[in-house]
Amino acid sequence: MSEHPADLDIRADLSARLDLAVAVAAEAGELILRHYDDRDLVVETKRDDTPVTIADREAEQLIRARVEAKYPDHAVLGEEYGESNAGARVRWILAEKSFARFNGLFGSAVFVIGVCQFQLNLRREFAKRKTRL
């Protein structure tokens, strides 16, 4: 029994998206780690009293750039820069709902005090159905 060609196309597309997610997460992780030991790291406080650093902003900008270059018709939603291409059929979410707020670099508070226990969250949403990557 052979697979339907449309099923193969869907799998190939999902595989390509997963490959991009893994590659961009690794690249953003390396970028974030470059800021980890920076003794001059500037920490700002956002309106919701959560910290934000250049690591947060640069990581989001990098991920946005990679996703938008590969999939210009997709939306990208992040904590620091909001949503681009709102209403697109596919949306990449650079943050996770966590304790009722978004946080793409989950653990910014521990990151800024030097605790090496933080994570980068990346998710995609397709036709209003959320899936973890």
Image (cartoon, rainbow, N blue to C red):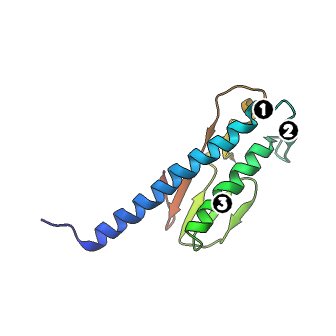
Name which residue lies at 63% across and 53% down.
94
**Residue topped by disc 1:** 112
Q: Earlier in the sequence, mark 1 or mark 2?
A: 2
Q: In the visual, does 80 lie left or right of 63? A: right
Tag 1: amino acid: Val
Name which residue lies at 52% across and 53% down.
21
| Neighbour tally class for label 2: few under 14, some 14-19, many 20 plus, Cα within 10 Å | some
Task: State whether residue 4 appears in this view.
Answer: yes
Considering the image in quadrants, where does the N terminus appear?
A: bottom left
From this viewpoint, which residue is outermost toward the left?
1
Position of residue 5 relative to residue 30, above or below, is: below
Q: Earlier in the sequence, mark 3 or mark 2?
A: 2
Name which residue lies at 53% across and 58% down.
124
SS type, badge 2? loop
Real-space Cα distance between discs 1 and 3? 23 Å
Residue 64: mark in rendering: 3
Task: State whether residue 98 appears in this view.
Answer: no
Point out residue 46 in the picture as x, y percentages from the top left corner: 84, 46
Asked if marks 1 and 2 touch (Cβ < 8 Å), the reply is yes
Position of residue 82 relative to residue 34, above or below, is: below
Residue 43: mark in rendering: 2
